[in-house]
Amino acid sequence: MPTRINWVEAIRPLLNKYKNKKHPLDYHNVYQLLVMVVLSAQSTDDAVNKIAPKLFATFPDLETLAQASPEGLWSYFTGIRNFAHKAKWLTDIARQLGSNDNIPLTMDGLVKLPGIGRKSASVILRGAGRPPEGIIVDIHVVRVAPRLGITKEEDPKKIEDGLMKILPRDEWDAGMAMSFLGREICRPKPLCEECLMNGVCMYYAKVIRPGGAAIKPKKAAAKKGPAVKSKKAAKTASVIKPKKAAKATTATKPKKAAKPAKPKGKKPT
């Protein structure tokens, strides 16, 4: 992998793969998308998609939503985290705007609404077919972008700022493209061998195939340690033991018998 990546070029296969792919939220107009984006914060898209049909059957537009009380929405938000605050935000938005026609389709206008930040606003603008005014940085992009090596940041705002400096505006949909990649391939446990970005991916180069070979698990390496030591110990023991045995079996020379002592007194005549 080259040490310096031209990300303007490198990101294009990802953009081509996910170009014009609809967001996983199952919306049918900008009003529904706005409501679902607010509900999806810290909740899954599947959970929001599940409650959407009943919610929109009762509240098909901002006019009808404006007539509801926050508490009146609670029963529709089963499985949605922070549902009480979201119900308040949505009724406030409905009363503030009054009509679907008044939904602002600019970054500045959307982020002034309760419960909508830059990421949510970018999702709404993309779904409405408007030119991007920012880059979508969701939980998936926070994981994928540093793995690729396009940024070292982990804070969503800093990641967006960095990507907006690196990529031209017509490639700012790279955020949603990385989000799709994170959902399908670059998961917490990534499917790196299937990824079309592995040729430029820092994580793949450094962790999965450094030097062209996959890293061996540490556990496997640890198991080899005791086996090698036991062989050395066995080899050493086989050398030492014969020597000890040889010393043990060597016969000792008998000591010479002592000469009998001469009797004391006069010599015999």
Image: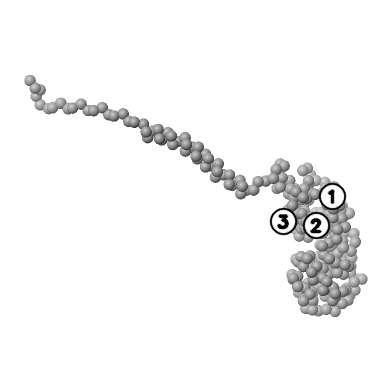
Identity of the residue drawn at 84% across and 55% down: 18
Outermost residue to the right: 101
The residues bearing labels 3 and 2 have C-alpha atoms spaced at a distance of 13 Å
Q: Left or right of 256: which side holds 178? A: right
Tell me the number on the disc at residue 13. Answer: 1
Q: Name the quadrant of the C terminus.
A: top left
Identity of the residue drawn at 78% across and 78% down: 71
The residues bearing labels 1 and 3 have C-alpha atoms spaced at a distance of 22 Å
Identity of the residue drawn at 52% across and 39% down: 232
Task: Give the percent coordinates (x, y) of residue 22.
Answer: 85, 61
- In the depicted view, which residue is nearer to us: 201 or 116? 201
Tell me which label, 3 or 2, sits earlier in the chain: 2
Outermost residue to the left: 269
**Residue neighbourhood size for the residue with mark 3, other residues' Cα within 10 Å, grouped as few (<14), some (14–19), many (≥20):** few
Q: Left or right of 250: which side holds 94? A: right
Tell me which label, 1 or 3, sits earlier in the chain: 1
Q: Looking at the picture, which amino acid does disc 2 mark? A: Phe
- In the depicted view, which residue is nearer to us: 225 or 140? 225
Task: Give the percent coordinates (x, y) of residue 19.
Answer: 87, 55
Question: Label 2's element?
Answer: helix
Outermost residue to the top: 269
**Residue 158 visible in image:** no
**Residue neighbourhood size for the residue with mark 1, other residues' Cα within 10 Å, grouped as few (<14), some (14–19), many (≥20):** few
Q: Looking at the picture, which amino acid does disc 3 mark? A: Pro
Q: Which residue is mark 2?
A: 180
Labels 2 and 1 touching (C-beta < 8 A): no
Q: Which residue is mark 3?
A: 188
The residues bearing labels 2 and 1 have C-alpha atoms spaced at a distance of 13 Å
Q: Left or right of 266: which side holds 146? A: right
